[in-house]
Amino acid sequence: MGFLQFFFWKLQKTESNIEAPNLLDRSSRIQNGRGSVTAPAPQKAKAPEYANRFENVTYKEHNSPVSSVRVEGIASTPVGNENSGPCLAPSCHRLPPIGSLTDITPPNDMERESMSPLTPKISNMTPVGGDVIDIAHKGERSGSLQGDNSVSNYHNPTTSVPNLKNKSWTPPSYVISITEMNKLLQQSRVSSHQPAPKWSSIVDQEILLVKSEIENAAIKKDTSLYWPLYRNISMFERSYELMEKVLKVYVYQEGEKPIFHEPSTILVGIYASEGWFMKLLEADKQFVTGDPGKAHLFYIPFSSRLLQLTLYVRNSHKRDNLIHYMKDYVDMIAGKYLYFNRTEGADHFVAACHDWAPAETRGPMLNCIRALCNCDLKFGFKIGKDVSLPETYVRSANNPLKSLGANPPSQRPILAFFAGNPHGYLRPILLDHWENKDPDMKIFGPMPHVKGNINYLQHMKSSKYCICAKGHEVNSSRVVEAIFYECIPVIISDNFVPPFFEVLSWESFSVFVPEIDIPNLKNILLSISDERYKEMHKRVKEVQQHFLWHAEPVKYDLYYMTLHSIWYNRVFQIRTT
């Protein structure tokens, strides 16, 4: 009997000695739309100390101004108490119309609600709304390419912004660079601010043992993985291996369709990630358990896209009802089961791709692990706890890998390519500076529609670098599209946390350009040597396996990588009583 098996056997022998306190009895305001629950009968809560836990939660109106976001300082020693949570209230902007539930496939450049004002590059010590961001410098990360791709060689804080007629340039508040994000991730591993569980559980002890195993992982052995892509290949392999052996997920059966348990209508378009993840997890027989007492994680199976389509009142410019609907759901499961209150939601998670998901999952869900496509540090995304969910533009529900394939480096004559509608403040600046200005820079507005989007795909497959410029939100399906077609992603989106950030070394296969450096874009790309470009292309090709949906999940694919990142962050954020 191995050490892990003996440990878990010993824990199971003593599990009956662990007693859980009673919790508050809340009335159920959301009916079960899925029939009877196969899990053990829920225990009703009685402890009065939890009685007012959510009653005092308040929400800002949709048109309230965005307050300053407080970002905790990073120091060379662990930081103490966490600052109060950031304001998540978005600015008031035009909202997209509601489509039919039977026809919700958006175009490639679907208009989004604007939530992110422009943000500039900051120094290591910058006042933000009265607070100070202190970024400490630590060691190099493994797997990074060295040398000539540093955009800092061209960064000039005094670079003038194009003078656009009838277009406004909003002064930025702050920018967290990719290097500074790495420091935030390191700090999150040292000091977790998740609430400690109200009482101990066997699953906590299992996770703590797993954490020790990951931290002391042996040298890598899986030759199918290309080690330069990862922050620490040994830790990733060990974590993935233990996930396969240990992880159990409980899926709440409560919730009415179509908002809950209805993935089939969102398997195409730019919100497809939340549909595919829900579909595959609810059918998973390896990780899903019907016994919540054995679960390490709890999945809240809602669709942020279908929540918007179902409940948003057209032209109201308000979504308070969406926010309160999710709060009511959490109140219901917290009153019906023991588990949410035990950790204050720290072992619960959602996977949501609509732009409004950060707002819909605030309040009592802020402690949950939120796998979000709209992963904007300015609006409360927490590195090390939350997960950046890839936004994937799926064109066929029957074949999510349709049109996969690309040209080799020798058949990519275009230096850089972008095409899209001028959503948000950034794209008009990109277009004003580069559209039809340079034969090497194929920068366009919306391209003429051709069946199958052939012209757009041909450009991506024929370009060395694909520009992934933010629209209204920081996220863009172009990041995954570029990887899909083996084009180096050039990410121009300040405060965007790239997918699977806790595992992948993004600087090794992509280029990050601060928004203020758009005028220097060509120089930045030309500074990358041909040798380095070919190595980056190889890495993009290798990392591609992590960004593919399959009807039947394949090891290391997008489904398993999403689940792994949720698991990985839970392992490193867990606290003991």
Image (cartoon, rainbow, N blue to C red):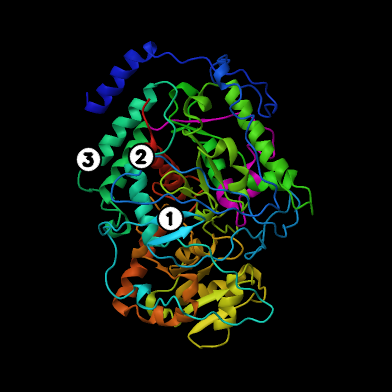
Vertical relation: 101 (above or below) 112: above
| Residue 261 sits in quarter | top right
Residue 293 shows in the view: yes
Q: Quadrant of the image for the N terminus?
A: top left
- Find the distance from the CA under tag 2 to the CA under tag 1: 26 Å
Q: Position of residue 289 (x, y in %)?
A: 48, 27
Residue type for callout 3: Asn
- Find the distance from the CA under tag 3 to the CA under tag 2: 13 Å
Magenta part of the chain: 247-275
Vertical relation: 485 (above or below) 7: below
Q: Position of residue 335 (x, y in %)?
A: 60, 22
- Of pointers 2 and 1, the one earlier in the residue sequence: 1
Q: How many residues crowd mark 2 within 10 Å: few (<14), some (14–19), many (20+)?
A: many
Residue assigned mark 2: 572
Residue type for callout 2: Phe
- Which numbered tag is attached to residue 345? none
Residue assigned mark 1: 132
Whether residues under marks 3 and 2 lie with C-beta atoms below 8 angstroms apart, the answer is no
Q: Main secondary structure of the magenta part?
A: loop
Residue assigned mark 3: 216
- Find the distance from the CA under tag 3 to the CA under tag 1: 35 Å
- Residue 266 covered by magenta stretch: yes
Q: Quadrant of the image for the C terminus?
A: top left
